[in-house]
Image: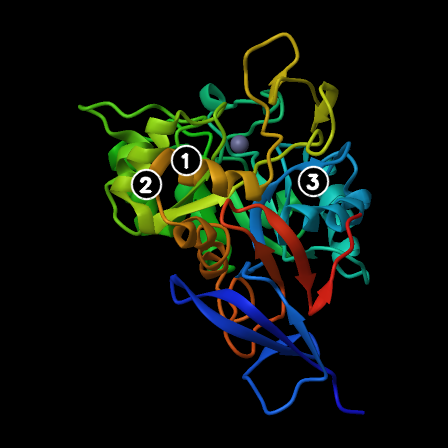
Amino acid sequence: MQARVVRFVNGRIVANHSITPGELWISDGKIIAPSEKADSTVDVAGLIIAPGLIDLQINGGFGIDFTEEPERVLEVAKKLPQYGVTSFLPTCITSSKEHYRDCLTALRAQMNAAHDGANLLGIHLEGPFFNVKQKGAHNSALVRPCDCVETPEELYGSLEKVMIVTLAPELPGAENIISQLHKEGIIISCGHSSATYDEMQKAMNWGLSFATHLFNAMTPFHHREPGVVGSVLGTRGFMYSVIADPHHLHQKALELAYRLNPEGLVLVSDAMSALGLPAGHYHLGTMQVEVDEGKATISGTNILAGSIIALDSAMRYLVAATGCSLVEAIDAATIKPATLLQIQHQKGTLEVGADADFILLDDTLHVHSTYIAGELVPNA
Ligand code: ZN
């Protein structure tokens, strides 16, 4: 039987870094070239048709923490489309060797299971090779130096499905770890780090190609020691993520990053288990977290413990802070993360042949509908 062809009309399409009037045609879960006849037509009433959002760093949501309850990741996957998120990398934070093995095994099993909702593209491992001075919300007892005897594969159990590892490249032994991960095709990102400018330059030569939640959990910019921030923003096109909410980044800091290195800017949520839930007490890995007035902190401290935003609100904050165009904000959550993962012809794009994961947005970047593999996702 011939697959049904659906045509979306009266919309504005995101393509090639611009938004232009056009139609989207899909069939069998893929985007197709316009053809002669469609089986059905959907009028999108002037909305923007954009690729589905891709979140490279999310720790959980809806009361579920991926590090503690990885077997429940699909419950979150089902609910993320309400924010326009169609793909994500569940993120596992600093853990013991035994816990990494269990957590990664459970995440991989869920990834291989048939499910509704957002796609699980792979895993982001945050830790354990962090500078303890920049541990942020990670448990200092579990942070490890890079000069341990195990290879990353021995520590994590397996590197299967691991797509990003965030580590501090200034640690003794980091060259070895970075080289091993790089050889496996894993993206190595600088984070929770006190690296100097020179240490960053060296690490970039070893294969480091990304920076995690720029400005947060790293030494600030100094005019005699530009550090990670100076390195990333001074290398036009070098990619970095930002948590675009007012608790993690002052609007002016976000604007500075955007002005200096707009091509590199990628939005992540770094959302924790309270995403989608009211103020209260929650978990991030082994840490207790309090959420109040939109801010998540380690209980009894002012240490930020991830966000409670999703990528749609990150896009809106980026526009408000920087005055960037709507398409730049959309690109920062779609084609740019897809390009980092080298899946830019399959996800984060509306080009012919790509997966039909797309969203309908209004001009304030609020999500009206989300489609995954060509199917409208009902609000879970
Ligand atoms: Zn972090």
> Is residue 113 among what the camera can see?
yes
Residue situated in front as seen by the camera: 300 or 269: 269
| Residue under the image location 42 percent in, 54 percent down | 327
- Residue that mark 3 sits on: 100
Establish whether ligand 1 lies closer than 8 Å to the Cβ of label 3: no
Figure quadrant of residue 340: bottom left
Quadrant of image for the N terminus: bottom right
Residue situated in front as seen by the camera: 19 or 354: 19
- Residue that mark 2 sits on: 258
Cα–Cα gap, marks 2 and 3? 35 Å
Question: Where residue 6 sits: x, y (%)?
Answer: 68, 78
Q: Residues within 10 Å of mark 3 (few under 14, many from 20)?
A: many
Figure quadrant of residue 299: top right
Residue 320 numbered mark, or none:
1
Q: What amino acid is found at the position of numbered circle 2 in the picture?
A: Tyr
Q: Is residue 162 above or below residue 27?
A: above
Q: Secondary structure at mark 2?
A: helix
Left or right: 65 with respect to 220?
right
Cα–Cα gap, marks 1 and 3? 38 Å
The numbered mark, 2 or 1, whose residue comes first in the sequence reads 2
Marks 1/3 in contact by CB < 8 Å: the verdict is no
Residue situated in front as seen by the camera: 47 or 15: 47
Question: Where residue 146 sits: x, y (%)?
Answer: 49, 36
